[in-house]
Image (tube, helix red, strand yellow):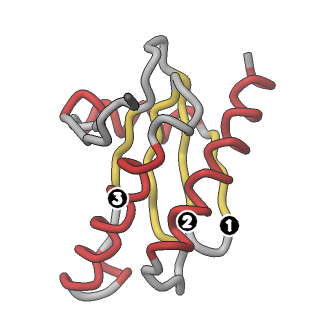
């Protein structure tokens, strides 16, 4: 049986310090839908944080972005690279499309993992 597809608190970046550490690493990957900032972590799990600025749109639009990003991570977490803390931001002008977010997240995390390995 496969592992459950949940999104517990242990898989989330929660404190301002954790977000700052990811941004301070200076490593990011981007495409037409998302921008993802990354930082390696010593754990065998990847943790996600969301940063959806008000420039993205009104609250229903921002909440839609959050729901789609969380769902993409939740359903694909076992296929994604391990040992990465990352923060997701929508690209300026992008629209919250669930399928586009899902494919973008996977592609960008693989790109980001390569950049992290080069840095080590």
Quadrant where the C terminus lies? Answer: top right
Q: Nearer the viewer, residue 7 or 3?
A: 3
Specify which label sits upstream in the sequence, 2 or 3: 2
Residue at which label 1 appears: 31
Please say if 3 is above or below 98.
Answer: above
Label 2 crowd (10 A; few <14 / some 14-19 / many >=20): many
- Image check: 65 left or right of 110? left
The residues tagged by marks 1 and 3 sit, at their Cα atoms, a distance apart of 19 Å
Quadrant where the N terminus lies? Answer: top left
Image coordinates of residue 71 in percent, x first then y, are: 34, 58
Residue at which label 3 appears: 71
> Are circles 1 and 3 on residues that touch, CB within 8 Å?
no
Residue at which label 2 appears: 34
Image coordinates of residue 117 in percent, x first then y, are: 74, 23
Residue at 43% across, 57% down: 72
- Image check: 109 left or right of 59? right
The residues tagged by marks 2 and 3 sit, at their Cα atoms, a distance apart of 15 Å
Q: Nearer the viewer, residue 114 or 57?
A: 114
- Image check: 15 left or right of 98? left
> Are circles 2 and 1 on residues that touch, CB within 8 Å?
yes
Image coordinates of residue 87 in percent, x first then y, are: 43, 47
Q: Nearer the viewer, residue 104 or 91?
A: 104
């Amino acid at each position: 049986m496969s592992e459950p597809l949940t999104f517990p608190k242990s898989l989330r970046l929660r404190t301002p310090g954790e977000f700052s550490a990811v941004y301070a690493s200076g490593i990011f990957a981007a495409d037409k839908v998302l921008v993802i900032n990354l930082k390696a972590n010593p754990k065998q799990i990847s943790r996600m944080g969301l940063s959806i600025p008000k420039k993205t749109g009104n609250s229903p639009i921002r909440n839609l972005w959050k729901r789609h990003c969380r769902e993409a991570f939740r359903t694909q977490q076992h296929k994604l690279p391990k040992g990465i803390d990352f923060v997701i931001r929508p690209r300026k002008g992008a629209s919250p499309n669930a399928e586009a977010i899902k494919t973008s997240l996977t592609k960008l995390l693989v790109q980001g993992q390569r950049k992290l390995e080069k840095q080590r």
